[in-house]
Amino acid sequence: MTVPSDPKYLCVVREVTAKMWQMHGLGEEMAEQIRLAVDEACANVIKYAYGGKADKRIVVRYKVDRERFEVVIEDTGIKADPGAIMGRKLEEVRPGGLGVHLIKRCFDVFEFDGRKKIGNRLRLVRFLKERNEDRDNGT
Amino acid sequence: MKIEITEHRGVKVFGLSGDIDMYSSPELRKELLSLVGKKAPMLLIDFREVSYIDSSGIATLVEGLRGMMSHGGKLKLLGIPERIVEIFSFSKLDKVFDICGTLDDAFKG
């Protein structure tokens, strides 16, 4: 899916993400957190990679199999510095710095593909171990 | 997102509905900080019709809270739906904000 880097399209990303999660029979409760996490990741692209410019493009890809739910988010903006991405301490009450926590709490893998020459390719993976255990146990 | 400002027992009630995200939170920020600047002793934000909130919406609320606290005022959040209350507890903001179940609860204490 390709969407413009305009915040008004974030609702589209949210809906598609939640549907992708739900249509593979994954938990309804977790759908909210996954939807929020991918929204936050795309909002970061708009804010940091594109500096708020609304006329760029964000590519969001989904890959789902028995083991994982994977979302890859690509842009052609300013390169992120993975070492500098850290949220605020949750105990500190101040605006900002919450988004990265919301992403990392539900994805096991949060990594930038260093091979991408222009822009960023963020790979988010949630392993579906618990789901498989439930299925194997017949629950 | 829609914003409707009403009054209940002399207190401004900031009624929100729909999604609060990066697209809509600048409007929320503008309206909220404008009311906060009037230095009322209390402001209520009604969440009963809110379907979604992201970190930009949360950041706006924190700004509003700080603004109210700067003049000794109170900012209370009313009727946060179950599907979004989780983000408040995750970010530990349920300990900071005064969260009320009903309009009447907001006027107790």
Image: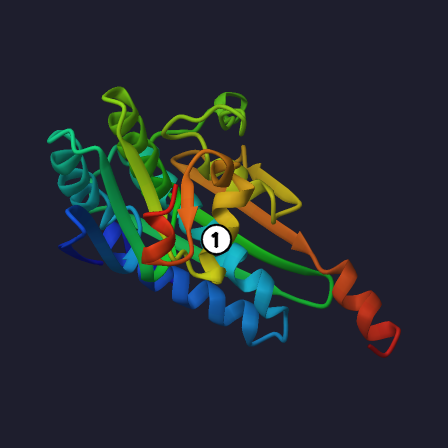
Q: Is residue A10 visible?
A: no
Q: Residue at x 22, y 56 (%)?
A: B15
Q: Nearer the viewer, residue A128 or A62?
A: A128
Residue of label 1:
B85
Q: Is residue B28 left or right of residue A35?
A: left
Q: Residue at x 49, y 25 (%)?
A: A88
Q: Is residue A62 visible?
A: yes
Residue A110 percent across, percent down from the top left: 59, 40
Q: Residue at x 38, y 39 (%)?
A: A44
Amino acid type at image mark 1: Val
Q: Is residue B35 left or right of residue B56?
A: left
Q: Residue at x 40, y 67 (%)?
A: A15
Q: Nearer the viewer, residue A67 or A11?
A: A11
Residue A139 percent across, percent down from the top left: 82, 77
Q: Chain of mark 1?
A: B
Q: Nearer the viewer, residue A138 or A94?
A: A94
Q: Eyeballing the image, is B108 above or below B72?
A: below
Q: How is the image coloured?
A: rainbow
Q: Nearer the viewer, residue B7 or A108?
A: B7
Hey, which residue is sitting farthest front in the picture? B109
Residue A59 percent across, percent down from the top left: 38, 54
Q: Residues within 10 Å of mark 1 (few under 14, many from 20)?
A: some
Q: Secondary structure at mark 1?
A: helix
Q: Eyeballing the image, is A72 above or below A16?
A: above
| Quadrant position of residue A99 | top left
Residue A134 percent across, percent down from the top left: 81, 70
Q: How many marks?
A: 1
Q: Quadrant of the N terminus of chain A?
A: bottom left
Q: Eyeballing the image, is A30 above or below A38?
A: below
